[in-house]
Image (cartoon, helix red, strand yellow):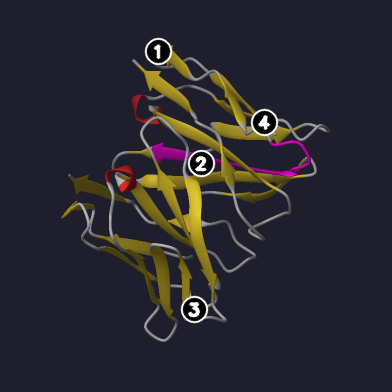
């Protein structure tokens, strides 16, 4: 059974640009969550989607947005990139909504903003 | 909202010794407490979890204890091995809210 797939794995952008990250959950999983991981702050929750609806949103500015498609695949977008957006962005899928069980994480997309 | 504090941030132990990582949480409504292990270059992976209706759970060399009165929970790894070296994260949730993670503990097992 394939795990959570995130693309791209690595990318470099410059300040002011925008970026789109993609996440394909485990087959049959309907919930997708996104986390930002930085050395100083650990894992910080960005948002969660279930059946194409955003269920929860973390404390991030409006430059961070996401969506989920009918096949449960999800994308997140960051506009007007800032240096502080450099981080590992992790996607996780689960069978049910909210925190009813195990989160299965992908290997992440490492974003560097120059 | 929930706040999870995790200590220590780094931990070095000799192979075969035990390792203990401690977390405290702030929201008394939290009832689900998982622990995740993240190896270099990989995403976090669930290693054990506990719900608030039990005080302790064990899985081979790994155990988790929960004290709801004091709002803290701990991860215990016995007979540590080099492959236990990784970053460990605790987390807490009430079930209606997203998981809130601690900032992680980098465990090094010295052979």
Residue corresponding to mark 4: A2
Mark toward the start of the polypeptide (2 vs 4): 4
| CB within 8 Å, label 1 to label 3 | no
Measuring from the top left, give residue A13's x and y in whole percent: 43, 13
Query: Is residue A30 in sight in this rendering?
Result: yes
Q: Could you say whether the residue bearing mark 4 is in a helix, strand or loop? A: loop
Instruction: Find residue A20 and report its image quarter.
Output: top right
Mark 3 Cα within 10 Å, few/some/many (few <14, many 20+)? few
Whether B31 is drawn above or below A82: the answer is below
| CB within 8 Å, label 3 to label 4 | no
Q: Could you say whether the residue bearing mark 1 is in a helix, strand or loop? A: loop
The chain to which mark 4 is attached is A
Res A35 label:
2
The residues tagged by marks 3 and 2 sit, at their Cα atoms, a distance apart of 24 Å
Q: Which residues are magenta?
A: A26-37
Q: Residue at x 42, y 13 (%)?
A: A12
Residue corresponding to mark 1: A14
Q: Are marks 1 and 3 on the same chain?
A: no
């Amino acid at each position: 059974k394939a795990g959570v797939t995130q693309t791209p794995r690595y990318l470099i952008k410059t300040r002011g640009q925008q970026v789109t990250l993609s996440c394909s959950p485990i087959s049959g999983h309907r919930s997708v969550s996104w986390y930002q991981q930085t050395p100083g702050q650990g894992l910080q929750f960005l948002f969660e989607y279930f059946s194409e609806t955003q269920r929860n949103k973390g404390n991030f500015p409006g430059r961070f947005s996401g969506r989920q498609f009918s096949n449960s695949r999800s994308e997140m977008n960051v506009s007007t990139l800032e240096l502080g957006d450099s981080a590992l962005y992790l996607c996780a899928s689960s069978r049910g909504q909210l925190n009813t069980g195990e989160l299965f994480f992908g290997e992440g997309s490492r974003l560097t903003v120059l | 909202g929930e706040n999870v504090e995790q200590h220590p941030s780094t931990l070095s132990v000799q192979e075969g010794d035990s390792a203990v990582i401690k977390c405290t949480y702030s929201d008394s409504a939290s009832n689900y407490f998982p622990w995740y292990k993240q190896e270099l270059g990989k995403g976090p992976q669930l290693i054990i979890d506990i719900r608030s209706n039990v005080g302790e759970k064990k899985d081979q060399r790994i155990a988790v204890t929960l004290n709801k009165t004091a709002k803290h929970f701990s991860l215990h790894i016995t007979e540590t091995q080099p492959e236990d070296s990784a970053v460990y994260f605790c987390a807490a949730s009430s079930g209606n809210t997203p998981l809130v993670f601690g900032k992680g503990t980098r465990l090094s097992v010295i052979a």
